[in-house]
Amino acid sequence: MTERALVAPIWILAIIAVVTALYTAASVLAPVACALFLIALVWPLQQNLQRFLPKLLALAVVVCVVVLGFFVFASAATWGFSRIGRSVIADSARFQLLYGQLADWLEGHGIVVAGIWAEHFNVGWLVRIAQGVTARLNTMISFWIVVVVYVLLGLLDTKTIADNARAALDPGTASVLIDGSVQTASKLRRYMLVRTLMSLATGSMVWALSAAFGLRFAAEWGVIAFTLNYIPFIGPLVATSLPTLYALAQFGSPQAAITIFAGLNVIQFAIGSYIEPRVAGYALAVSPFVVLFSVFFWSFLWGVFGAFIGVPITIAVLTYCMQSPSTRWVAQLLGPPGRIPNRDET
């Protein structure tokens, strides 16, 4: 076998090894990835505070901002889901009846699996789900404690690592590494700014639509839409499906549920497909297929956090690929159709 013939199998084995390592070491690598992401977001704040505050005091302020941001986001999500969850449990008999009717209708059309699900759809099933969510929340708290520690240490060493890279590496390699990091951080900040603005717009419009139709817990549905909108594709799908199912149970009318479903989809389509790409600009544009693949791939590796961090990781990889002529074709291949970006484009 020639040397060229061995290239493809070696690359395949290397990719399999990397994916396996990412999956196996998720408990170690996921907090590191989250910490790097947060450091990219808050580093300008750290630099600005250090102009008139001691370094350690500025660091303490930044860490408090990170913790406060996580607390507010988690509290909002917990409030929305818990309020609706308690309502579903309190009105479980009605949901059980509705689900039984839906199961009978599906069985009448030859889908017998619905009957199997109907046997398990009861209060005990909902309680078990609530217990599972509680266990995940405990795990998430431990996860974020580790992340905060990494952020604390990373902010202390960011400048030192950059200086060490310039001293240890040749100028070309150091330039690729440092320039790629600076551009990646800039793009991630823009990504989160755009994502937050679009999430606020989506949540507000979902709240307004729910209130206009008389759907209970309109504010909660808006908060849920806001939090889930940070996860591309999967988040909007869940944020659209849950209010629709609840509307079907509340109004008992398929027409009302379909109308609300259509309205929610119009909101998601208008913001996600029309407004957001124009606000984000070309620098954040990624092929829709790559975005969808990133969400599912990283959610497979790292769960819900992977679904959130998948697109930022992809943006970072493509930005680093643009720094070197040997890998620039990767960014051009996986980027959006149209104009080829320059290396310095952000």
Image (cartoon, grey):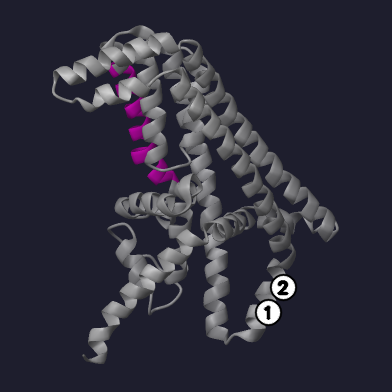
State the image quarter where residue 162 is shown: bottom right
Q: Is residue 3 left or right of residue 159?
A: left
- The picture places residue 263, in percent across and down from the top left corner, at 33, 22
Query: Circle 2: is it few (<14), some (14-19), or many (20+) Cα within 10 Å?
Result: few
> Which residue is drawn at the image coordinates 75% and 45% (left, top)?
64
Looking at the rendering, the stretch of residues picked out in magenta corresponds to: 258-279
Q: CA distance from mark 2 to mark 1?
A: 6 Å
- The picture places residue 255, in percent across and down from the top left corner, at 26, 12
Q: Is residue 157 above or below residue 281?
A: below
Q: Is residue 321 above or below residue 312?
A: below
- The picture places residue 279, in percent across and down from the top left corner, at 44, 44
Residue that extends furthest to the bottom in the rendered view of this protein: 2
Mark 1 — residue? 164
Residue 230 appears in the figure: yes
Tell me the amino acid under the disc marked 1: Asn
Prevailing secondary structure class for the magenta stretch in the rendered image: helix
> Which residue is drawn at the image coordinates 41% and 18% (left, top)?
122
Label at residue 321: none
- The picture places residue 250, in percent across and down from the top left corner, at 39, 9
Label at residue 160: 2
